[in-house]
Amino acid sequence: MDALYLLIPLSILVVLGVGVVLAWSVLSGQFDDLESEGRRILDDSPPAKTNENP
Amino acid sequence: MPVDPQFRKAKILDDGGTLAATSDAVCAHCGDPLAGLKVFRRLIGGDQRSFCCLGCAFIAEQVYLAQASNRDRAALTGALTGRAPGLDIAPPNMARAQVPVQGMVCAACALLIEHRLRSEPGVAQAVVDFGASRAYVAYDPALTSITRLERVIERTGYRAGAREPGDDTRSRRVELLRLLVAWLVMMQVMMLAVPSYLASPGDIAPDLQQLLRVAQLVLTLPLLGFAALPLVRAAVSQVRARAIGMDLPIVIGLGVAFGASLVATVRAQGPVYFDSIAMFIALVLGVRWLQRRALEAAHRHVEAALRGAQIVAQRLRGYPGSMLTEAVASEALVLGDHVLVPPGETVPADGIVVHGASTVSQAWLTGEATPFELATGGAVAAGAVNLDQPIVVRVERAGDATSLAALRRLVEDASRARPRVVEIANRVAVLFLWVVLGVTAATLAGWWLVDPARALPSAIAVLIATCPCALALAAPAALAAVQSALARRGVLTARIAAVEHLARVDTLACDKTGTLTLPVPELMRIVPLRGLDATALLARAAALEALSNHPFARALTRAARSAGVTVPTIAEGVVAPAAGVEGIVEGKRLRIGKPDYALGLVTREPLPVAARLLKRLEQEKLRAASVVVLADPAGPLALFAFGEMCRPGAVALVQEVQSAGIQMLLVSGDRREPVERVARELGIGAEGARNVFALQTPESKRQIVTALQAQGRRVAMLGDGMNDAPVIAQADVSIALAEGATLAQARADFIALHSRASDVAALFAGSRKAMRIVRQNLVWALGYNVAVIPLAAFGYLTPALAAVGMAASSLLVVGNALRARSIDTGATTE
């Protein structure tokens, strides 16, 4: 059971890490449009040359 | 509105447009001095005005447009009904404005802002739309100003005014992040909380238990500090505005639970309730997210349709000297412009026909889709569709001043009222808060006298047990569930309150044309007159009608195509506006069209021929039907009767609605025969003719609805959403079947995008189910809270048990609400 004294704090750190990654991904707009990305593979038109920031 | 002298003062500035002002000029909107500032100029209502900033300029423009359209709408409604039919028309001298409001978290915030705005001097009406994040205000410009109203909103705790571009996406992302963080933390806290539920006392070492407590505390901090921030803010602004809503008792309950847990953690003994806090916040945010998304989807659809409805006008630059046209957006037209409207196109502005004559359809304004004839000098409204001949129209009113624009604005005004159930829950909250605080104080005092050691735990148990979390979730969760289910079927909810109204409707008034029947007429019957072959006659008629754009002509050519006949060629074809077509087919001169016109070709004594034709029409029971006559110089050749086809699914809809105990009415502006035929086909009015009304004007339809309401009935109106403004305003609920172009003008509580009759049946079933669930939820939530108060107060319920009960109650309510996502509609299938 002694392992818990290490594992619980570690798990909290992991959760905090996940939270930071989540914040970054949401705030950078990765969840803004969940529908059209999935359909993009079906789109035949050539991709745009430069990929500018949204 | 007379131009304020201040506006004139600002005009003395030099013509650079962005140079410094040197005089005592002030901003035309907010009245701040302009000296030394960069000046923004706008042409408003024919006057150039100067503003201190882009914001003021924008708002002043909006105010002007709103005033113009308001006058217009008042005139329009007055013309339609003779008096105001219950539409919100601001009293004279009132200005109307839309103010964007940021930072609302729920419908209660909207109610609060409304409340504050209404108590402001000079404000006649204030309605806040939570879904569109907008406040609609009618105010007296002499008593107050937009800037002052914005300050009121700011003081209430929200942000007002035009938002920064991108601000919207940012706030949406933050909302999503709050939701995700809440669920992430909730799962972790649950995991850490499970051991203390499963273990019997003494199983877990005290320091391990303390570790679990601290871990939960650490995880709960971001939850309260970030995810639950909107709840806390709402509660704070409710306190500040002295308008108690549901959020305050919730935040008090959460705060007490957190405080007790915090104390237990610091003292390293006693139970903690972090798991209940986490779960409740996650559930509330989840429900609000769903509701917000459903509302946003509805608004997006309507806005997209409005953008798609931009009309391109053919402006005649040199009229009458030249007929050269240029294509401009209809918004760019100004008074006195001349526009060419080719057949099949939409009239871009209100105006007078100065050249040509034609048949036009003004279905969206006058009611029935029956086209009417328009001669030179006649007035035509924007949005009318020209069916026959090219006409030249002189613009009388353009852009935002047209009646079309005024009607469009109503779409924006649609989602205002909040459901009564949500408001009741909110009103109950105030009472609830006082009862809970009173009981808590009594518990504390009572136990203090009996057993001081148990006073605090019992008081905390009361506060946690009575946290009205389930009550707060009861109605919104079910409404959000049914809205998203309807949206998946293509039925948009423009006004959430309408779900509640629809569930209580006992009478459904139906428009006929375009609603129960398909919007275009079909060829129903061919009557050959001189023993000729029907197919050959159809071919000849189709050859003539190929030239015309009239709905009957198109129905005839459609019928010829589906019958597979070869259409002969036509020579010397001439279209007579609003009458028919003449031409030479297979070597013979023929005419098709209205009886008088077609018989005009007949050379031998015309009166007996006409009399015989009339007799024949009588025999065939076609006298009142829509009949087109094909004739050659020797006399009439054939009669073509047109009628409407019932929409697929209409019969099932009528059956379902009637079997649900709702009385069906057919209310139409059409003639008696076709209306009764459709009623028979659909099975409406089996027990007598009192259910079928023909030859109705929009105003008489409104009177029918008013009379029914006076008998205590709740009436829903089902129409194509474009016409009958008075009826739609009068009915308790309105449903529109709208697709394509008509969506732009549709204004109703519900808009069925695919125009399927089965969707309407689903709408009825869904709203009834949702309201049943709301009632169950409210009864459960209130009953549970009331039942546990004595248990907690007398010490039978520990705070830990109270927390479990609160969480279970919330889960039960949300689970029950999710049932509204599946709508069973009896027999109909997709």
Image (cartoon, coloured by chain):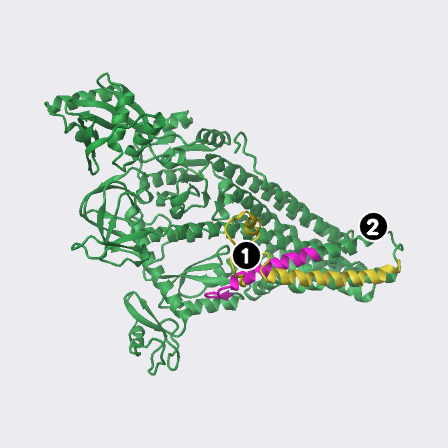
Chain colours: A yellow, B green
Q: Circle 1 sits on which residue? A: B108
Q: CA distance from mark 2 to mark 1?
A: 40 Å
Question: In front of the other: label 2 or label 1?
Answer: 2
In the image, what residue type sits under mark 1? Answer: Ala
Q: In which image quadrant can residue B54 be found?
A: bottom left
Q: Is residue B576 left or right of residue B455?
A: left
Quadrant position of the N terminus of chain B in the picture: bottom left
Q: Is residue B4 magenta?
A: no
In the image, what residue type sits under mark 2? Answer: Leu
Residue B544 location, x and y as percent? 24, 31
Query: Is B599 placed above or below B126 here?
Result: above
Please say whether residue B626 is visible from this viewpoint: no
**Number of marks in picture:** 2
Query: Is B459 placed above or below B754 here?
Result: below
How crowded is the residue under tag 2: few (<14 C-alpha within 10 Å), some, or many (20+)?
A: few
Q: Which segment is the magenta one?
A: B159-184
Q: Main secondary structure of the magenta part?
A: helix
Question: In percent of the image, x 57 and y 54: which residue is there?
Answer: B426
Question: In percent of the image, x 59 and y 42: which residue is there?
Answer: B821
In this view, the residue in front, B785 or B488, is B488
Residue B719 location, x and y as percent? 40, 39
Q: Circle 2 sits on which residue? A: B198
Q: Secondary structure at mark 1?
A: helix
In this view, the residue in front, B85 or B336, is B336
Q: Is residue B644 left or right of residue B187?
A: left
Q: Secondary structure at mark 2?
A: helix
Residue B144 location, x and y as percent? 39, 68
Question: Subunit of mark 1?
Answer: B
In this view, the residue in front, B769 or B431, is B769
Between discs 2 and 1, the one toward the N terminus: 1
Query: Is B368 placed above or below B350 here?
Result: above
Question: In percent of the image, x 32 and y 55: which residue is there?
Answer: B329
